[in-house]
Amino acid sequence: MYKHRNWGKAAISTMLVAALVLGGCGAGGDNKKSAAGGGSEVVVSKEGFPIVQEPITLKMFTRIAPVNGPFKDMPVFQDYEKMSNVKVEFIEAPTDGFQEKKNLLFASNELPDVMFRSGITPLEAVRYGAGGQLIPLEDMIEEYAPNFNKLMEQYPEIRAAITTPEGHIYSLPGIVTLGSARTDKKWINKAWLEKLNLKEPETLDELYDVLVAFRDGDPNGNGQKDELPLTARTGLPIVVAMSGSYGLDLQFGYNINIVDDKVEIWMGNEKNKELLMYLNKLYKEKLLDPEIFSQTEAQFLAKQGTGNTGMFFDQTNNNFLPIADQYVGIAPPEGPYGDRLQSQGSPVPRDPGAFAITSVNKYPEVSLRWIDYFYTDEGSTLLRFGREGEHYEIVDGIPHYKPEFSTAETQPKLTPYAGGGAPHIISEYVASYINPPQVQEAQKKLDPYMPEVRYAAPMFDEETAQKVNMLRNDIDKYYEEQSTKFIAGALSFDKWDEFQATLKKMNLEELQQIYQEAYDKMEK
């Protein structure tokens, strides 16, 4: 179903960047002289450290999560300043209200040198790049970001995800090469299976039977019917978690299948109907959490740790560590048509717009070399773990936090990774905290059913992006509202034809054609 792409021909061509914009970026020699204003120049080393012989300062605008401490106190930035000779002054904006502050920066044109962990959206990258406030990076990457360039060669979907229709790259993403950091595992209560003499379910029918047994068989042994058979995050994540059993994939970060080079938005098709009917059956029979459309994230996470939940979906085992041996990961259940797909998952370029260089930056080559270090295991280890011996130790060949730095309180003070969206690489080497053996085993159950390539959301030009946003705002809201009603039994499936007709009136086919054209351009 998923064929391997000829990515050689699919690579998106890049455009030449005006020398004026790049401050005279050119090839030749091992080092580069970068204009520093006032007639002076700095020599940029293309490899090794320090990056520059004479110290320079960069101002970086960044999002700071509620759990984080000041970035200036984090060992990664203290130590990297000594290594690189690049001092960073962070302009920290809290997560709450961050988008408004980011918008104001660009609207007022009071720009920092760099946007770090600032979640530049594809639309923002195109808009501020075309407007000259973010500079294009594609002609500098090979020379000044060889580690990132190597990742693009290894995973061509990265280049496709960050290149505009005009051939420019205005921002770099966070990269996740570790498969288990891109999926929610299907955790099931192994202790309950054993007590009820049941095997891991292999099909949707078997899953139904298991959930009924969890409901009726008193697996917790208290003589009460208080077990929760199945739960998930609030809203429609349950649809995402189960869609692969009906062959429904999630390409381009949307409800999209790509089969034989054809894009299909599957919202409203017959397999989607059957999926919603299955979930309605679970909901109606109290096999699916009755609070699934109302619970908070905190309530969902708490249910993982009670030991009184039969099955749920999450990336790691962090939220049920005290009772971790009670659970095991399972493969996607096979659906009625033989479909068995792990549809839920993130692409390799997972965190878009994690790093961008603005037009006021006098040292673009230095800035690109500065960030490139974090696209290596060594740099990512420094960013995530701090100092060896002080904050982490090497165990079985990979870094592990020392106990005092592995808590939910201490870790976010240590690393900008906590809180998400930092520009770096999450590889198997640096993922001990989120990829312990139990999680690795759960991922192995999913690996045979994952698509070869998970396409990230495509880069559209601004006009097309605005059109997509307009269409999706209406379509997504309607789909979520109606799907919720179908699952909860508030809307009869007799209304399915009416549901399909309304989606069509909302120009679902036009949206599908836009994604088709984006896909076709990637394949040229």
Image: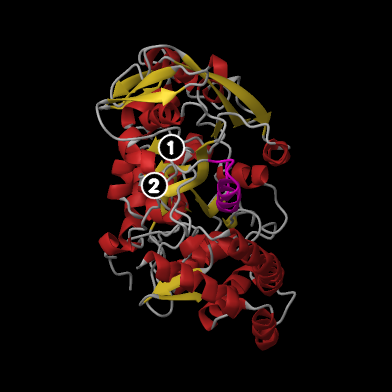
- Is 306 in front, or is 446? 446
Q: Which residues are magenta?
A: 119-134
Q: Amino acid at mark 1?
A: Ile
Q: Number of callouts in the render?
A: 2
Q: Quick one: label 2, few (<14), some, or many (20+) residues within 10 Å?
A: many
Judged left or right of residue 406, residue 277 is right
C-alpha distance separating marks 2 and 1: 8 Å
Q: Secondary structure at mark 2?
A: helix
Q: Residue 199: say if magenta.
A: no
Place of residue 485 in the rendered image (x, y in percent of width and height, measured from the top left): 71, 72
Residues at marks 2 and 1 touching, judged by CB atoms closer than 8 Å: yes
- Is 507 in front, or is 209? 507
Image quadrant containing the N terminus: bottom left
Q: Which sits earlier in the primary sequence, circle 2 or circle 1? A: 2
Q: Amino acid at mark 2?
A: Ser
Looking at the image, is 332 positioned above or below residue 406?
below
Image quadrant containing the C terminus: bottom left
Can you tell which mark lies on residue 180?
2
Q: Which residue is mark 1?
A: 434
Quarter of the image for residue 50 reads: top left
Place of residue 75 in the rendered image (x, y in percent of width and height, measured from the top left): 47, 16
